[in-house]
Amino acid sequence: MFLGIDVGTGGTRAILIDRSGGVVASSSSEHAGIRSEYIGWAEQDPEDWWRAAREAIAGVISASKVTGSEIEAVGLTGQMHGCVMLDADGAVLRPALIWCDQRTQPQCDWLTEKIGFERLIELTCNPALPNFTLTKLLWVREHQPEIFATIAHVLCPKDYVRYRMTGEFAMDMQEASGTLLLDVTNRRWSVEVAEAAGIPMEWLPRLFEGPEICAQISVAGAGATRLAAGTPVAAGAGDQGAGAVGMGILTPGSVSATIGTSGVVFAATDSPVKDRLGRLHTFCHAAPGRWHVMGVTNGAGLSLRYFRDTFAPDSSYEDLTARAANAPAGADGLLWAPYLFGERTPHLDPDARAAFVGITASHSQGHFVRAVLEGVALSLRDTFTLFEELQVPVKAIRLGGGGARGPLWRQIQADVYGHSVELLQAEEGGAFGAALLAGTGVGAWDSVEAACAATVRVAETIEPKNTAVMNEAYKRYRRVYPALHEIARS
């Protein structure tokens, strides 16, 4: 059996799978809320991730009634881009700036001017964005130099949990792609970018491919988790890379649309696809020798949670979506722009702001909820528009995350994308992919592709029904961001 651990934004989830891909047990533990002292800031405490990981692992072991020694290997995944800074003793120096933190645009501007926009794309396949790890380090250097001076190690969230489990500093290629410090084309740290930014190379952990075994559970890690000391630990991947493995998105033409806190459209490629304008991310895939291109909507599932918490705190998500189902496709003209934490694809604008547009007295709460669901899908459609421009093939779209769990949001996505979408028999998210990477690392399967072929199965295909209506909505939606941008500038 193989254990996959997903250190997400809202919580940590652990699942145990067998060699057929069956889920033996799963368990989750919530994280403390995101700290946002100022607009655009987002921080979490790495020690809280470690606490939640221990609880999730304990829950899986208890639910499955297995012993730690029966678990053959462990794989990790989690929220990408977070900046965990440790001193020489491995102690956390400050709360981690996480993926949705938007404070670092001045550092992005400085880095772009220092290296050059085109050169940065050539070196890393990506532009400087506030989401990326490097720009967070530069913010700390400028605003908290006393902390910056004591940094000895830089990790991402799931890699910090691995450090606590194993004592090893390690990172996989896919996760490292999101730091802005990786030469994505050649799958190695970029000495040129690190030197230009003033980041010592010795701060950066060793690099591994996703299924490679990079560490073993230490004696201290075993005592904290009930796993057996010496258990192999695979490098794993960031949440999107591991999620794509868990959905079988490995070959050109295979695409996933995953709605979690953020939303991601992800396409596998055989070589790096570089968008000269930097609107899409190009990263190494979790599978060796492959890459992927993806677009990101920062406020996807977050939009629905924000609406519920702010306007309907006594309602469940099921209640809200039931009301949304009573509103027609297109929400009678009501639009939602989901820019709660700025936006990445295609606008690269940390200052973008969310809005409902077209409100009338006839709109019910159901219209508003439907507009939120449709607005997230319309935002993700922007990525498909860029795929078409860059000739990235789309043969099949598989749905993941919260957007795959309800029939209404599934149908809305098919309608908005204008393409049939596939629902998997067991969509278990990044933790499932991390477990597959762990199993591949210890030889249960010959390759990541073989692991997916043995375990990933399509359960249902949903055909679009309201394409014409949503095409018209998309035309109007595309006019919202320029108007909001103009308002913000005035």
Image: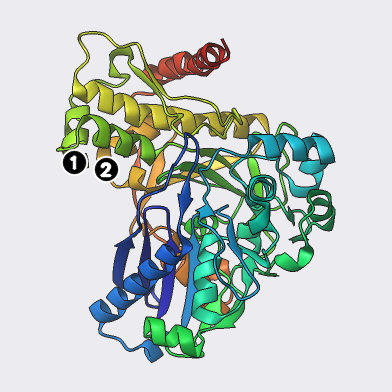
Where does residue 256 sit, x and y in percent of width and height?
48, 46
* Residue at 54%, 66% in the rendered image: 92
Classed neighbour count for the residue bearing mark 1: other residues with Cα under 10 Å, few (<14), some (14–19), many (≥20): few
In the rendered view, does 307 fall on the left or right side of 230?
A: left
Q: Is residue 128 above or below residue 216?
A: above
Q: Position of residue 132 (x, y in %)?
A: 62, 47
Number of dots carrying numbers: 2
> Can residue 453 be seen in the rendering of this structure?
yes
Q: Which residue is at a point 25% across and 35% down the rendered structure image?
A: 308
Name the mark on residue 362: none
Quadrant for the C terminus, please: top right
Q: What is the three-letter code of the residue carrying label 2?
A: Gly
Tell me the amino acid under the disc marked 1: Glu
* 237 to the left or right of 6: right
Could you tell me if the residues under marks 1 and 2 are in contact, i.e. CB atoms within 8 Å?
yes
Asked whether residue 445 is in view, the answer is no
Asked whether, in this view, residue 123 is left or right of residue 480, the answer is: right
Q: Which mark is residue 406?
A: 2
Q: In the picture shown, does residue 429 fall above or below 369?
A: below
Q: Earlier in the sequence, mark 1 or mark 2?
A: 1
Under circle 2, the secondary element is loop
Q: Is residue 380 above or below residue 188?
A: above
**Observer-nearest residue: 139 or 154?**
139
Q: Which residue is depicted at the point 49% across and 44% down? A: 396
102 lies above or below 486: below
Near mark 2 (Cα within 10 A), the count class, few <14, some 14-19 or many ≥20, is few
* Local secondary structure at mark 1: helix
Q: Which residue is mark 1?
A: 318
Say which quadrant the N terminus sits in: bottom left
| Residue 136 percent coordinates (x, y) | 63, 48
